[in-house]
Image: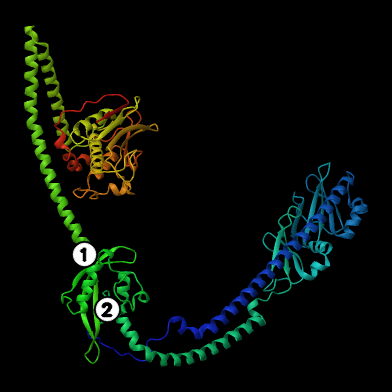
Amino acid sequence: MRFLWFSRPAGLFSADPWRRATWALPLVLALAFAASVAAWLRHSDARDLEDERLTLIADTLTLEARLSDWLTAEHAAVDRLAQQLPAEVDDRVLLSHPAVTEGLRRLWVSVTALDANNRVVAHVPQQAPASVAPPRERTGVSLDEGGVTAHWSAARVQGGRLVVRFAPSALLRQTLPWWLAQKYDVRLVDALGQRIAQTGDPQPREGTQSYRLSVDPAMRETWLELNTRERHIPWWHTLAAALMAVFILLSALASGMLRRQMREVRRAEGEARTEAAWRRAVEDSLSVGLRGRDLEGRLTHLNRAFCDLVGFGPDELIGRLPPMPYWLPDEMDDSLRRHQRNMAGGAPRDGYEARWRHRDGHVLDVMILEAPLVDASGRQIGWMGSIVDISARKQAEERERRQTEALAHQARLSTLGEVASALAHQLNQPLAAIAGYNAGAIRLLERGGDADEMVMEALRRLGEQAAEAGRIVQRIRAFLTRRAPQPERCAVTEIAGRALSLLKRDLRGVRVALSFPEDLPEVLADAVLIEQVLINLIRNAVDELQGKSVPAGGASATSPVRQAPEVHIGATRVGERFVRVDVDDNGPGLQGRRIDQLTTAFYSTKPEGMGMGLAICRSVIEAHHGGMEAGVSALGGARLSFTLPLALTSRSLPSSGSASPSSSISPSISTSISTAIDPPMATTSSPKETLE
């Protein structure tokens, strides 16, 4: 075998990606450290902002409470003043009242008395009162020629009204504590955002926080707004951010210098690895397994495809002599002979097939082609083998062969079914003639009056047997007829009796036990199709019982004797809607197989089986809205069960408009035709009956 060597520029192949990126590790660590510091600064900045905002909200609530308390107290004073004034009020009376004097000295701007028609009857001090009547609300704010004023209105007993005006700016001076005035700019604004009163700067500065709170109901449509005076500086404008930027820049410069130095080192190493890397790349790119052996048969070289093929790693195979771990144990001698033949140079030039075992246990078929391995001087130093996995091709060939056999079997069964159908049709006429002649003979003998009783009894039995033969023929024709399910009320005991009568010959030597409750209700089903399902299950149980030999009771385990095969057929009611029919045997059992696997199309445990019987049975049961189950029997063998709906509670099954399940079950039906013309087996209606 010749190898083509290719050369590439030095430095093309270098170390693994992690090693190539080692130079960036200091820069990555620096970035991670800077990112963590930035995250901490951001978190600290956000926490400070949140604390400042919480403090701002608390101070706003405190100031709003002071304003509300002060306004409530002033409103109470106005209410008392309104109650104390006499019915006839003028400027002199209003000005002489002590409460008015105290209010004007403290905060009030003016006091106005209105009559029931909102006309001014008194006003102090002497400035002209506003021409607009005050609103009806308890407290309000208005804009007039004198500026921004607030007013109260209090009702009198005579129906008049007393209006007191005050300056909001004076209100702020009265209620704003000095420590809040140093921290915040305080404003009173209306619903449109216009300032009513303020302390500090008229406009909020950038980088500050503000909070607005409604003063209702103390002052209608009036908002209290607090704005911080200290400007908040973001963390990225601080000295710490500048230091981090310088730190990252220096780390980037250091990483660049380190990368340049490492590239020089890798370039020198790459020149030495180029040839080996190219050879390994070519070998690993192949899908064919390659193995190299020396003249003694020792493995010296393997590629990735070979290791994947057998499931062993190179460290487990390199340097190993035969026998190999992937050889089949039962074919070890044949494998060793092939190995000796190949080492002697007798390997076929076109290759040869072999069977190997993967590490996980599954067997695979391979095609092996051997060629001598020579060195540069032309001397043979070993053997190079190419291994191709042909398991998929072998499986496809086997699957195609089995399908061909199954189709041939299907054709034979179909032909047999047609013959049986024609035979049943031809037998119907002779049976009808026999029944007619028998009935005529009985009538003639009865008319004569001197007939022998034994002859009459024989003729009656002959008529009964002819009628039974006719019914058997009708069932055979019904089996072979392609039709949709025709549900009707029927008894499970009668269906089981007819099935056993058809299988009388197959059940010779098998102990059959029937177990049906006396109160078992009728089911809604197609009796012919269910009879076919039951026949298939019983026949499968009998086939599994053939050749079984187990230690019988009382016998020692070292001297096994043949145990009598048994098949039990029973039925029980399940819930309020279904009846379950069980077929048990004492055979070898299902050996872990589930119902889904057993009912798969073309799956069979019999060498000559086609694998369609149970699949068809399941389709029939599902067409009756039932289900099939598989499990362990109480007899130690297998149990196959199916459910059928009760006649009283189940809905009717569709009789047309869908594909007929019986159209796909004719193969399994035809397997039971050979016993259908046997004499019927006697059955009884007792709860439990044993047939030998």
Three-letter amino acid code at disc 2? Gly
Give the answer, above or below, for where 674 lies relative to 80: above
Instruction: Give 675 or 165, whichever is nearer the viewer.
Output: 675
Instruction: Give 320 or 159, whichever is nearer the viewer.
Output: 320
Give the answer, above or below, for where 5 lies relative to 581: below
Q: Residues within 10 Å of mark 1 (few under 14, many from 20)?
A: few
Residue pictured at 18% horizontal, 28% vertical: 680
Q: Is residue 276 left or right of residue 75?
A: left
Q: Is residue 418 left or right of residue 590?
A: left
Three-letter amino acid code at disc 1? Arg
Q: Residues within 10 Å of mark 2 (few under 14, many from 20)?
A: some
Q: Who comes first in sequence, dot 1 or dot 2?
A: 2
Residue pictured at 60% horizontal, 86% vertical: 246
Query: For the view shown, which residue lies furthest in the top direction?
Result: 449
Instruction: Pick the quarter of the image with the N terminus.
Output: bottom left
**Camera sees residue 480:** no
Instruction: Give 383 or 211, whichever is nearer the viewer.
Output: 383
In contact (CB < 8 Å): disc 1 and disc 2:
no
In the rendered picture of this protein, how many numbered marks are placed on residues?
2
Looking at the picture, how far across and down is residue 621, in whole percent? 28, 39
Looking at the picture, how far across and down is residue 190, in whole percent? 70, 60
The residue to which callout 1 is attached is 393
Indicate the quadrant where residue 293 lies.
bottom left
Residue pictured at 27% horizontal, 88% vertical: 5
Q: Is residue 352 left or right of residue 625?
A: left
Indicate the quadrant where residue 557 lies.
top left
The residue to which callout 2 is attached is 297
Distance between mark 1 and mark 2 Cα atoms? 29 Å
